[in-house]
Image: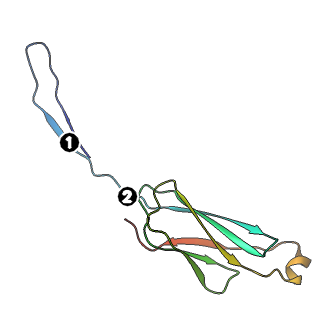
């Protein structure tokens, strides 16, 4: 970003000063997971919490699924949200314990 400024009075003008500031790009993602018990699916809501556009797929790694899933997107702007899903069959062991612990993270594969 470039900014120019000068001061003036009725008869005198100052010199013009120009300052260029380089903006810092801060890519960041926030992920929230929820469960749909009616169809045994996990819903991943990923928000671009940074200040740059995110392009390309977002890779979700979940401790309950074998591997990862990709959420395709072409341009996720700052503050925008995108969702993806995966399936997980709840086992009798899960029901007996009363809860399951899930570890999930999102990774951006390309920054614009």
Q: Where does label 2 land, which residue?
A: 25
Q: Say which of 105 and 82 sits in front.
A: 82
Q: Quadrant of residue 10?
A: top left
Q: Badge 1 local density, few (<14 within 10 Å), some, or many (20+)? A: few
Is 52 situated above or below 90? above
Residue 50: x percent and y percent? 47, 57
Residue at 81 percent across and 71 percent down: it is 37
Q: Quadrant of the C terminus?
A: bottom left
Residue at 40 percent across and 67 percent down: it is 111
Q: Closer to the N terminus: mark 1 or mark 2?
A: 1
Identify the coloring: rainbow
Q: Where does label 1 land, which residue?
A: 19
Task: Say what secondary structure mark 2 lies in.
Answer: loop
Residue lying farthest to the right in this orientation: 96
Is 2 situated above or below 83? above
- The answer to whether residue 82 is left or right of residue 55 is right
Q: Quadrant of residue 36?
A: bottom right
- The answer to whether residue 16 is left or right of residue 41 is left
Residue at 88 percent across and 72 percent down: it is 98
- The answer to whether residue 13 is left or right of residue 93 is left
Disc marking residue 97: none
Task: Say what secondary structure mark 1 lies in.
Answer: strand
User: Are dots 1 and 2 in contact, CB under 8 Å?
Assistant: no
């Amino acid at each position: 970003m470039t900014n120019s400024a000068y001061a003036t009075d009725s008869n005198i003008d100052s010199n013009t000063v120009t300052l260029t500031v380089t903006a810092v790009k801060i890519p960041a993602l926030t992920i929230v997971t929820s469960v749909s018990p009616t169809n045994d699916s996990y819903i991943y809501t990923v928000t671009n919490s940074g200040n740059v556009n995110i392009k390309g797929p977002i890779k979700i790694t979940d401790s309950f699924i074998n591997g990862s899933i990709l959420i395709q997107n072409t341009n996720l702007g700052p503050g925008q949200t995108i969702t993806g899903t995966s399936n997980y069959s709840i086992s009798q062991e899960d029901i007996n314990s009363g809860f399951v612990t899930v570890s999930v993270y999102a990774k951006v594969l390309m920054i614009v």
